[in-house]
Image (cartoon, rainbow, N blue to C red):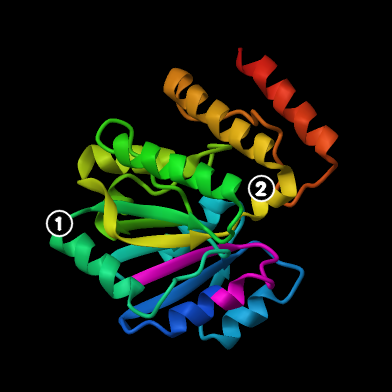
Amino acid sequence: MLSIIIPTYNEEDFLPALLKSLENQTYRDFEVIVADAKSTDQTREIAVAYGCQVVEGGPPAMGRNHGAAAASGETLLFLDADVILPDKSFLSDVLREFRGRRLEVATCRIDPMTDDPRDRFFHWVFNVFVTSSQWLFPHAPGFFILIRKSVFEAIRGFDEKIMLAEDHDLTTRAADIGRFRILRSRTLPVSVRRFERDGRFNVIAKYVLAELYMRTFGPVYTDLFRYRFGYRKGVYNHRRRIRESVRRFF
């Protein structure tokens, strides 16, 4: 069985589309576990209406760990609430490749849900980077991590003390004991809402600085970017936080 785990917090605008795309899959041997961080909107009610198991969540790493603890499947798939499976054969295709290549952990390439050339270029660069670096610096962003439960348990899941990029940390540790690759068969549509909310420059700068920090010092155990889930100020404040992060980094 495949256990699909989705961490959520106030995702009523995005979760239904993902759950509908899961409902339409030809592959049926799966369960859906929603790890909800005390949403104040209709997220929990939506999950229940679609027949999902709902467990207590928290920050993304904690929510994913709680979901994995409740999972019955031998394979885990972590998805973000704002992605959509593009067609009904997506799960069967990625699982066929995952099993056929005898992988223990994997991710896939991504495609933005927009025609904006800036977003398409960034995601193209991202795909090139994660594909070319998969042997030396494995990356599996949290919006799609496919991993055998035995490997997940062997590395004790996500490190909940990490403040940023806990998904990359998990992938690095998993790749030390299991075979990791980027799946070639399918591409996953992903939301660009972080670009729209925080600004492209700020998001890209955060990713670049986080990557440099991890390669230099290891996992990010300090709140390098003073990030708060759902926190929103003006563009000025986002740029100021990036400048402060650069000063702390160097």
What is the CA distance from the residue labelled 2 to the residue labelled 1? Answer: 35 Å
Q: Which image quarter is the N terminus in?
A: bottom left
Q: Which residues are magenta?
A: 1-17
Q: Is residue 183 rendered to the left or right of residue 142?
A: left
- The relative height of residue 143 versus residue 133 in the rendered view (above or below) is below
Which of the 4 quarters of the picture holds residue 227?
A: top right
| Other-residue count near label 1 (Cα within 10 Å), few / some / many at <14 / 14–19 / ≥20 | few
Residue that badge 1 annotates? 102
The answer to whether any part of residue 139 appears in the image is no
In terms of secondary structure, where does tag 1 sit? Answer: loop
Q: Residue sitting at 50 percent across and 69 percent down?
A: 84
- The relative height of residue 93 versus residue 57 in the rendered view (above or below) is below
> Residue 54, how many percent across, how many down?
55, 74
Q: Which mark is residue 246?
A: none
- Which badge, 2 or 1, is on the more N-terminal residue? 1
> Residue 93, how many percent across, how many down?
27, 70
Q: Is residue 8 magenta?
A: yes
Q: Which image quarter is the C terminus in?
A: top right
In this view of the protein, which residue sits in the foreground, 61 or 26? 26
| Other-residue count near label 2 (Cα within 10 Å), few / some / many at <14 / 14–19 / ≥20 | some
Q: Is residue 132 magenta?
A: no
Q: Is residue 208 rendered to the left or right of residue 9?
A: left
Residue that badge 2 annotates? 195
Q: Residue sitting at 44 percent across and 78 percent down?
A: 22
